[in-house]
Amino acid sequence: MRGLIFLALFFFGWLLALPAFAIPPVVPLVGAGVLKEPAPGTAILMPYLIAPVVVDEKLVAYAYVSSAVVAASPSAAVDVRNRTPFIQDCYVRDVNALPVGKADDPATVDVIGLATRMLADARKVVGTSEVVGIRIIHVQMSVIRPAS
């Protein structure tokens, strides 16, 4: 009986840990020139960004974007952390002003284009020399169901 309980708990723990290992970053790093891992202490996780996905002037889904700002140094990371609310505000204004979809497929998020826009927004708020790049960690779509 104990063995069965142990096996069930092990399997349940394994299922909980699986998504953390199964989801690779969508975009390794945008803006740094060379795609490499950021130095320790320079990646600042941002709050989720909720971007509307609009097709033919109609809201069809929301894209939940998990991202990180990569600072030039650990001391620059402190400046980025202090300005996180202002960066997030700039992100929200940007994704609501312009569509986040691809030109040929508006229902699909243009991850590279969005990361480039987010990099420009973060640099505008914090400073060009302080922000090295943007890492898009995960994009999850939530489709709005049509009214019947």
Image (tube, rainbow, N blue to C red):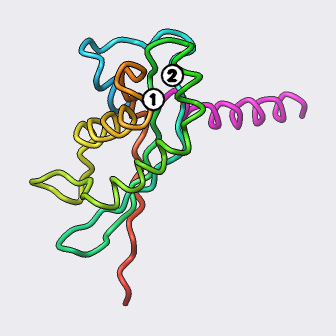
Query: Which residue corresponds to mark 2?
Result: 43
Instruction: Quadrant for residue 31, please give it.
Output: top left
In front of the other: 47 or 97 = 97
State the SS at label 2.
Answer: strand
**Which residue does the image show at 25% across and 58% down from the upper left?**
98
The local crowd at label 2, few if under 14, some if 14 to 19, many if 20 or more residues have their Cα within 10 Å, is many
Between disc 1 and disc 2, whose residue precedes? 2
State the SS at label 1.
Answer: strand
Instruction: Quadrant for residue 30, please give it.
Output: top left
15 left or right of 125?
right
- x%, y% of residue 94? 33, 53
- x%, y% of residue 62? 39, 61
Residue 9 sits inside the magenta stretch: yes
Considering every residue shown, the one lying at the far left of the view is 104
Q: Are the residues flagged by discs 1 and 2 in contact, CB closer than 8 Å?
A: yes
In front of the other: 46 or 145 = 46
The quadrant in which the C terminus is found is: bottom left
Q: Give amino acid for label 2.
A: Ala
- x%, y% of residue 111? 28, 41
Residue 69: image tag: 1
**Which residue does the image show at 39% across and 76% down from the upper left?**
145
Q: Main secondary structure of the magenta part?
A: helix
- x%, y% of residue 38? 44, 13
**Which residue does the image show at 42% across and 54% down from the upper left?**
92
Stretch of the chain drawn in magenta? 1-23
Q: CA distance from mark 1 to mark 2?
A: 6 Å
